[in-house]
Image: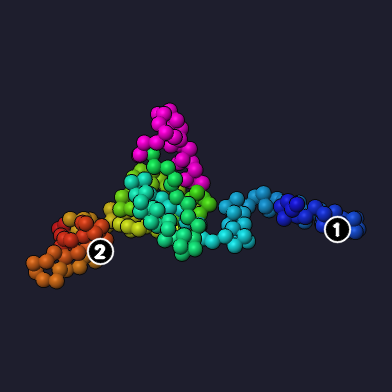
Amino acid sequence: MSLYGIDPEETAEALDNASHWDAANLMREMAARIIELETTDPAEHLATALERLNIPTIVAICGSTRFMTEMADADRALTWAGHIVVKPGCDMKNPHELWGDPAEAEAGKARLDTLHRAKIRLAHQVLVVGDYIGGSTRAEIEYARSLGKPVEFTHPAVDPAAEETHTALPRSISCSECGHPAGTHQPGDDPVTPGTCTACPPDDAHHDYQSTT
């Protein structure tokens, strides 16, 4: 069995056949290898192992459990495309005997939160499903990005980074109706038909640009 990438049988044979000087050099190389591996970020070890094992892209799905059906749809599409998918497995908004006891439900919620963060660490990238994000999903997005994981959205308008950008825009170039910049608005086909904001969710997109000045 290999430890730290060092095969004990091969090492023993090399030491048996080595001179005193060569053995000392070999031991120094082994020590340096162990120190290097011990001080390397574990995430790098995981990424290397996944690559060496030829593991397909792993996608962690995040989102409110109100979108469990949409998550299942995304899971099916991604799996069919050849990806490995990890996603929430328990919808605690719906009654179930597993979380029927309030004390166990509280402990289970914390356990599931920890488990989902582990899924994010395991994944190559994250997909956020749904046109709404709550506090838990927002925290998961921040966590994924802190790890350098690419984060994609089925509804890009809910991306907190996009919200921060819109908030930072000077009011003089923001739409008073939705807060998005003038460049995201398209005029209607005629003077009577409202325009469209390409940055808004579909249900809220149909309005003309309204200057704040």
Residue 136 shows in this picture: yes
The answer to which of marks 2 and 1 sits earlier in the sequence is: 1
* Image spot of residue 77 (x, y percent): 42, 61
Q: Which mark is residue 14?
A: 1
Q: Which mark is residue 198?
A: 2
Q: Nearer the viewer, residue 171 or 5?
A: 5
Residue at image location 48% in from the left, 38% down from the top: 111
**Farthest residue, direction bottom:** 189
Q: Nearer the viewer, residue 167 or 204?
A: 204
Q: Please determine whether, in this image, residue 148 is positioned above or below residue 111.
A: below
Question: Along the horizontal axis of the image, is 210 left or right of 23?
Answer: left
**Mark 1 residue crowding within 10 angstroms, few (<14) / some (14–19) / many (20+):** some
**Farthest residue, direction front:** 97
Please state the extent of the stretch shown in magenta in the rendering.
93-118
Q: Indicate whether residue 113 is drawn in magenta.
A: yes
Residue at image location 15% in from the left, 68% down from the top: 188
* Three-letter residue code for mark 1: Ala
> What predominant SS class does the magenta segment belong to?
helix
**Farthest residue, direction left:** 192
* Image spot of residue 70 (x, y percent): 35, 53
- The chosen color scheme is rainbow
Residue 97 occupies quadrant: top left
Residue at image location 39% in from the left, 42% down from the top: 91
Q: Indicate whether residue 156 is drawn in magenta.
A: no
Residue at image location 77% in from the left, 55% down from the top: 7
Q: Secondary structure at mark 1?
A: helix
| Distance between mark 2 and mark 1 Cα atoms | 67 Å
Q: Secondary structure at mark 2?
A: loop
Residue 138 shows in this picture: no
Q: Please determine whether, in this image, residue 135 is positioned above or below residue 51.
A: above
* Three-letter residue code for mark 2: Thr
* Image spot of residue 69 (x, y percent): 35, 51
